[in-house]
Image (cartoon, rainbow, N blue to C red):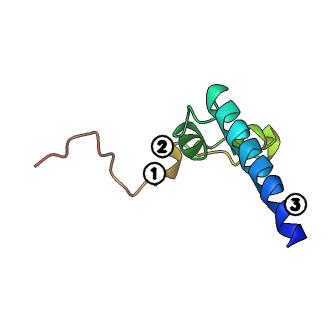
Amino acid sequence: MNIVMLLIPLMLMLVALGILLFSWAVKSGQYDDLDGPAHRILHDDDKDMIPTEARPSKPSSKDNQTESEPDKTTKRPD
């Protein structure tokens, strides 16, 4: 029974500490931007970390076109 007399005040102090910490977090703006981190994870920032010599070069569309394929921008005679 003596332990209950110790645990009840200890519990009340911990609850009061939790409420104080929560109110400090709200006042300091910790919960203001809830959507920013969710959108930030979608941005690809790995490109800055890859060295330029290791990046694959993208060939242009003219390089991929073979001689047998007609140019889609010119008109064919009917």
Foreground of the two, 6 or 11: 6
The answer to the question of whether label 1 and label 2 lie on touching residues, with beta carbons closer than 8 A, is: yes
Whichever of callouts 3 and 1 sits on the residue coming sooner in the sequence is 3
Residue farthest along the top direction in this orientation: 28
How packed is label 3: few (under 14 Cα within 10 Å), some, or many (20 or more)? few
Residue at left offset 79%, top offset 47%: 13
The Cα–Cα distance between marks 3 and 2, rounded to whole angstroms, is 81 Å
Residue at left offset 62%, top offset 32%: 26
The answer to the question of whether label 3 and label 2 lie on touching residues, with beta carbons closer than 8 A, is: no
- Foreground tag (3 vs 1): 3
Q: Which residue is mark 2?
A: 62
Mark carried by residue 39: none
How packed is label 2: few (under 14 Cα within 10 Å), some, or many (20 or more)? few
Foreground of the two, 13 or 45: 13
Residue at left offset 10%, top offset 49%: 78
Q: Could you tell me which secondary element the residue under label 3 belongs to?
A: helix
Instruction: Give percent across and percent down for residue 38.
Output: 55, 45
In this picture, residue 32 sits left or right of residue 49: left
Q: Which residue is mark 1?
A: 65
The Cα–Cα distance between marks 3 and 1, rounded to whole angstroms, is 82 Å
The amino acid type, in three-letter code, at marker 1 is Gln
- Foreground tag (3 vs 2): 3
Q: Which residue is mark 3?
A: 6
Whichever of callouts 3 and 2 sits on the residue coming sooner in the sequence is 3
Q: Could you tell me which secondary element the residue under label 2 belongs to?
A: helix
The Cα–Cα distance between marks 1 and 2, rounded to whole angstroms, is 5 Å
In this picture, residue 57 sits left or right of residue 8: left
